[in-house]
Image (spheres, rainbow, N blue to C red):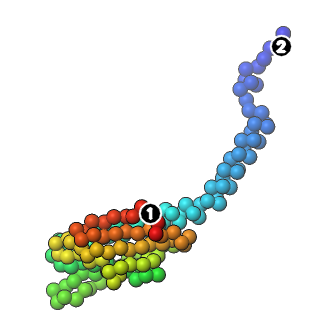
Amino acid sequence: MIARNDAAEMAFTLLELLATLAILSVLAAGTLLAWPKIEAALSLETGLHQLAADLHAARTLAIASASRVRLVFVPATSTYRRERKDDTGIYRLDVTHELPRGIKVIETNSAGNLTYSARGQAENGTVVLGDRRGVRRALRLNQRGRITILRTGL
C-alpha cells in the first residue's frame, strides 16, 4: 500500500494557481474598464449631496441672520455662489463653491437663484447637475425650504 502525504494533498497545483491568477486578471481588467463610469457616478452623487448641504447651510444662515440668503447658479459652469442681502437691500457675495471634478450645472429655473427668506421659507426651484457622460440628476427646493434629490435621471 502506498502512503499518502497529507501536506501534498493540501497544496495547490500549478494549474490551479494559474487558473486563479487568470480569473483575477480578468476581473481586474473589467474593473479598470468600468472605473470611469463608477467615478463619474460617484462625483455626481457627491455634487448633489454637497449642493443639498450648502442649501441647508444657506437656510440656517438666513434664519440666524434674519436676512435673505440665496444660492446663484450659472448654467454650463462648475461653480455657484452664496449671497446674503444686506441692510441696504443689495445681495453681497458670501462664498463661492466648486462642484466636484467633471460635474456642471446643466439648467436651473427660478432665474438661476434658490432664495431663502429670513424665516427659512424658500421659492420653488430646481437645479439639474450633469456629469461628463451626459447623465443628469436634479435637486428640488420647495416653499417650505425642504430639499429633495430626485432619484430618477432627467
| Residue to which mark 2 is pinned | 2
The amino acid type, in three-letter code, at marker 1 is Thr
Left or right, 31 with reference to 6: left
Q: Earlier in the sequence, mark 2 or mark 1?
A: 2
Outermost residue to the top: 1
Discs 2/1, front: 1
Left or right, 3 with reference to 93: right
Left or right, 121 with reference to 153: left
CA–CA distance between discs 2 and 1?
67 Å
Work out whether 16 lies above or below 76.
above
Name the residue: 43% across, 82% down: 75
The amino acid type, in three-letter code, at marker 2 is Ile
* SS for dot 1: loop
In percent of width and height, residue 10 lies at 71, 26
Question: Dot 2, how many residues are within 10 Å of its Cα: few (below 14), some (14-19), or many (20+)?
Answer: few
Name the residue: 26% across, 76% down: 123
Work out whether 112 lies above or below 102.
below
Query: Considering the image in quadrants, where does the N terminus appear?
Result: top right
* Mark identifier at residue 73: none
| Residue to which mark 1 is pinned | 152
Name the residue: 46% across, 66% down: 153
Could you tell me if the residues under marks 2 and 1 are in contact, i.e. CB atoms within 8 Å?
Answer: no
In percent of width and height, residue 82 lies at 31, 78
- Residue 48 occupies quadrant: bottom left
Outermost residue to the right: 1
Name the residue: 26% across, 85% down: 92
Q: Is residue 60 visible?
A: no
Q: How many marks?
A: 2
Question: Dot 1, how many residues are within 10 Å of its Cα: few (below 14), some (14-19), or many (20+)?
Answer: few
Q: Is residue 51 visible?
A: yes
In percent of width and height, residue 108 lies at 38, 78
